[in-house]
């Protein structure tokens, strides 16, 4: 992996997502269909759910770069991060995603995606905009929302206007990223938090 330090060539991504809106899903709460807005971190996510089910959740991704496994998303540390495989980025025409699956239906109040803070490759791999899709134990999409990342590390904080019940899986997918500003064409995320 070659870290490109010619950072902040993210203008293209920012423009690309300006017209993206959360898709309409039948039966989805009205609040979820609002247009994409900037994510704002409001206090720390307690990570209640992932602490409670530690070791009992299934974590998967669209791909993995060797040495930066998907388990890095749940290790409780900003570094190391998870990296997608080479060329698995929105900037390269792909839809890289990460997903948490619970062993049983849970109540979800908040889901936070911590942007790349990897100590070795801290720049050039950010996801700039992404969408969250939550499914219940019947496989139905019960919540979908798209956000642009907030802050210098591009974090995403999804807070539904009411608690989501009977949640089985949560998937975050990159809509725009810096896959075109690093040598590998990949993206990275540091951590996932669920309350
Ligand atoms: Ca981590």
Image (cartoon, helix red, strand yellow):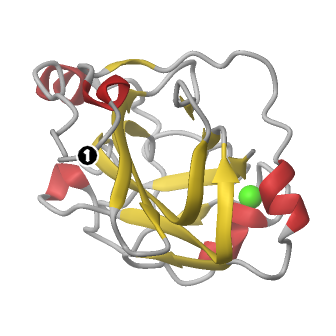
Q: Nearer the viewer, residue 154 or 167?
A: 167
Residue 134, x across and y down, in percent: 44, 55
- Height in image: 190 above or below 147? below
Q: Residues within 10 Å of mark 1 (few under 14, many from 20)?
A: few
Does residue 69 appear anywhere in the picture? Answer: no
Q: Nearer the viewer, residue 83 or 143?
A: 143
Q: Nearer the viewer, residue 87 or 54?
A: 54
Look at the numbered disc 1 and give the secondary structure of its residue.
loop
Q: Nearer the viewer, residue 63 or 192?
A: 192
Does residue 169 appear anywhere in the picture? Answer: yes
Residue 148, x across and y down, in percent: 37, 26
Q: Which residue is mark 1?
A: 27
Residue 173, x across and y down, in percent: 35, 54
- Height in image: 195 above or below 185? above
Q: Which quadrant is the C terminus positioned in?
A: top right
Residue 56, x across and y down, in percent: 78, 82
Image quarter where ligand 1 lies: bottom right
Q: Quadrant of residue 116?
A: top right
Q: Is mark 1 within 8 Å of ligand 1?
A: no
Which residue lies at the image location 83% right of the left edge and 71% below the top edge?
53
Which residue lies at the image location 53% right of the left edge and 24% below the top edge?
161
Going by the image, does 36 lie left or right of 48? left
- Height in image: 2 above or below 53? above
């Amino acid at each position: 992996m070659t870290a490109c330090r010619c950072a902040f060539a993210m203008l293209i991504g920012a423009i690309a997502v300006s017209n993206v809106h959360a898709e309409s899903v039948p039966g989805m709460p009205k609040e979820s269909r609002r247009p994409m807005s900037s994510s704002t971190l409001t206090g720390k996510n307690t990570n209640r759910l992932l602490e409670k089910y530690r070791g009992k959740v299934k974590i998967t991704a669209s791909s993995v770069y060797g040495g930066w496994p998907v388990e890095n998303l749940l290790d409780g540390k900003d570094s190391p991060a998870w990296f997608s495989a080479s060329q698995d980025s929105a900037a390269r025409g792909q839809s890289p995603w990460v997903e948490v699956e619970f062993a049983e239906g849970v109540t979800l109040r908040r889901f936070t995606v911590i942007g790349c803070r990897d100590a070795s490759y801290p720049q050039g791999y950010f996801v700039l905009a992404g969408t969250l899709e939550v499914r219940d134990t019947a496989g139905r999409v019960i919540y979908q929302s798209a956000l642009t990342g907030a802050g210098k590390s591009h974090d995403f904080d999804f807070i539904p206007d009411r608690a989501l019940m009977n949640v089985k899986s949560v998937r975050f997918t990159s809509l725009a990223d810096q896959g075109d500003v690093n040598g590998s064409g990949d993206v990275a995320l540091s951590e996932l938090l669920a309350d």
